[in-house]
Amino acid sequence: MLGAAGAWIVSKVPELVLQCALIVFSIVLALAVDQWQGERSDRDLALQSLDGFEREIGANRAKLEDKTDYYVTLRDVVPRMDSAGKLRTADEFYDMLGVQSFQPPALQATAWQTAVATGALRLLDYPTVDALSRAYNQQARYERVSESRMPEFLRTGTAPQGATRAMVRATLLYMDDEVREEKSLAAEFDNALAKIAAAKRREGG
Amino acid sequence: MFRSLRPVRAGAALLAAALLSLARADTAPAQTAARQPPAGAVAIIAHPRTPVNGLTLAELRQVFLGEQRYWRDRTRIQLVARVPEASERRVVLHVIYNNMTEAQYSRFWTGKQTRVEGSSPWPAFNSETAREMVAARQGAITFVPARQTTTGVKVLRIDGKLPGDPGYPLQ
């Protein structure tokens, strides 16, 4: 009933099945390769992001530690100079200690901004993102509070004459508060750095 | 019992004289009075517990360029630097930093901080503050006019010489 045409079609079925199978296989293979490339690209982005965070937080940590050390030393020096009568006037205070001594360290947040902009944060695990978020939030809070807490005479370099006793007391209190805040921020940085190191090990970086 | 005590007395006198001359030698000053350093000479002073008494100029450069960051007892080195407009700072920029300008000096330390290669020098607004900071902070080192050094800090020999010695390099 099929005749010659039918017989021809039937003879071609195995070839057709094979071709279909090959086409399907090629599509599946292409999808798999694409997925593998996407995962590799995500992994590279995650590692780059972690490297960036590690460098930036490490640098911020070093600047903070430097400032803390400086204030701890000045907290010894200022009372000694005061007792020795070297800080009797506002002019003497500024001559001895200056104003630039009390500027907070310039901390960076570029790595966080870049990670947010590139979507790299979605590639990191929750504990790492949590630690990074806490560190950068604490950093922003430290910068705001440090600026608002600084006595006016340290910001402007001018003070009324006769206010030296109050200046010395206020400076010591300011340094005490700064050291406390800096140590707290340093602890957050250390926590973030530990999470970054663990995440890099997991990613094979 | 004794025929004569004269030899005994003579021997005792000789012994006493010898002991007396030894005692005088012990109390003689160990060195002659320090030479007054010339005006413009710069002394390098460090915390009293710094584990060195002197540095060569090359070693001093390594310290001041931040290339050596620790003393041999693992204490971190902390530079304290007079802020601009000080004659001793000009000597240090000329001799130790090989004629760096203030702008170059500022860029040098900004670069080091960015690369986390060490902390930048602490600013000191006059020599007295610099001395107080060095006296208070173990590991600290700074430069002051040689005629203004006081007790409480250690003056380092540079190339084996103190300020005022002929050939002292920082003047």
Image (cartoon, coloured by chain):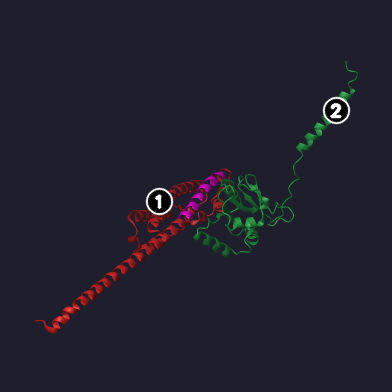
Chain colours: A red, B green
Tell me, yes or no, if residue A62 can be seen here.
Answer: yes
Where in the figure is residue B158, as x and y percent of width and height? 68, 53
| Residue found at the very far right of the displayed protein | B3
- Residue that badge 1 annotates: A191
- Label 2: how many Cα within 10 Å (few below 14, some 14–19, many 20+): few
Q: Are marks 1 and 2 in contact (CB under 8 Å)?
A: no
Where in the figure is residue B140, as x and y percent of width and height? 58, 50
* Magenta span main SS: helix
Answer whether residue A65 is magenta in the image: yes
Residue B4 lies, with reference to residue A153, above or below; the image says: above
Residue at left 32%, top 55%? Answer: A126
| Amino acid type, label 1 | Asn
Say which element carries label 2.
helix
Residue at left 25%, top 74%? Answer: A23
Say which element carries label 1.
helix
Residue B123 lies, with reference to residue B8, above or below; the image says: below
Where in the figure is residue B100, as x and y percent of width and height? 61, 64
Q: Quadrant of the N terminus of chain B?
A: top right
- Residue that badge 2 annotates: B13
C-alpha span from label 1 to label 2: 79 Å
- Relative to B8, A204 lies left or right: left
Boundaries of the magenta span: A60-80
* Chain holding disc 2: B
Where in the figure is residue B155, as x and y percent of width and height? 66, 49
